[in-house]
Image: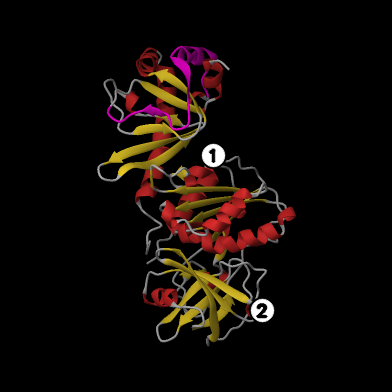
Amino acid sequence: MTSSMHPEPARVVARHEEAADVVTLTLATSPARALRPGQFNMLYAFGVGEVPLSTSGDPARGDLAVHTIRAVGAVTRALCRARPDDVLGVRGPYGTPWPLEALTGADLLVVAGGLGLAPLRSAVYQALAGRSSYGRIRVLVGARSPADILFRAELEGWQRRHDVDVLVTVDHAEASWQGHVGVVTALLSRLDLGPATAALVCGPEVMMRFTVRELGRRGIADDRMFLAMERNMKCALGFCGHCQLGPSFVCRDGPVIRCDRLGSWLWLKEG
Amino acid sequence: MTPRELLARHPFAHGLSEVQLDRLAACARSARFGEGEVIFRDGRPATALYLIVDGRVVLEQHVPARGSLQLENLAAGDLLGLSWLFPGGHWILDARAVEPTETLVLDAECVRTVMREDPVLGLALATHVIHALYQRLERVRLQRLDIYGAGA
């Protein structure tokens, strides 16, 4: 990992529109910058600014940095406008990965809400690459509407496999939608969750709080839940303190944090 | 399986004694719905409580100029319909089977009578209904936050 505050140039090699306001960029980087699932880069749109973005790519491709971006502010809008052969600044990788090696033998329960599927896609890629290392793998995905479902091709591909269960639900849908309707936590109540279950959760914080509460009701211990926290990360090095959450700096001690280590800080409202 | 046996396995009847199960089972009959079949419609009298045994049901609301919008799915173990709780109630949504669905249909007037005549059973059933209502309320709160919207 580099500790540099200086971004290095990286060329965009592919751009894919996932939804109306969501774009996935693939950048050519050196394998020394390979991201592990859960880790993030600071991506810099020259002259505009930089933002933290988790990897959404396949960790087997260490020469590529893949980031999925929703256009919500000046920097992310500039990043979403990038085209192949454009050059962006990259520094990283930073942060803690999903603890997939430590979870060998576990039943993996992946719970993603909205854009939270992006950092979890990487984790699923890695888990499927070492499929025999895990028990059941279940992927629960919540989206606003059918048009907002990300990575449809991957989800459909995973659904076709016999060794992964994928359940997708949307908050609202027209009558023609054949899938589930309702919040992602409602899917949890329909699963049998044994003591071998380990949950990887990413999405809006309010969704993660509801998910933690529901998993707790279902008997999953806090030390078997891992959350990818999103706070106001600026330096990514644990210096500036913008992302401080209780005793932790999310950029350095996270973004993936075990739930029991978050404790009551999970319920702290971001200012 | 008889309606009583199905009832005994459903979460709505968890914790009931054999005698209480007998009393409630006297209100119950089985009903199957094919894929796409409407179970009840908005505006019609709510004369029954449905317990979903197997399958999946969608609750829909018709919105002028937008057609039918899907609001929530219910599945095995869920309680379908709350408008039956009070005499004279009417359904406020459509319910449609998304896939072949097996239900237990409990006659509303019969259930209300059992609850009046056996206050212990009445409290147990009311507690189950309140629990289901609370869970539904939690989900609706999360749903209406529109948490996946831009900037959310």
In the displayed structure, A267 sits above or below A1; it is: above
Query: According to the image, label 1 marks what residue?
Result: A190
The subunit carrying tag 2 is: A
Please tell me in which quadrant of the rendered image residue A204 appears.
Answer: bottom left
Q: How many marks?
A: 2
Please give the range of residues in magenta: B15-43
Front position in the image: A229 or B59: B59
Q: Position of residue A30 (x, y in %)?
A: 64, 81
Q: Is residue A176 visible?
A: yes
Report if residue B22 lies within the magenta region.
Answer: yes
Q: Is residue A249 visible?
A: no
Residue at the spot 51% in from the left edge and 43% down from the top edge: A187
In the displayed structure, A57 sits above or below A117; it is: below
Front position in the image: A153 or B57: A153
Query: According to the image, label 2 marks what residue?
Result: A31
Q: Position of residue A258 (x, y in %)?
A: 58, 59
Please tell me in which quadrant of the rendered image residue A4 appears.
Answer: bottom right
Quarter of the figure with the N terminus of chain A = bottom right
In the displayed structure, A176 sits above or below A32; it is: above
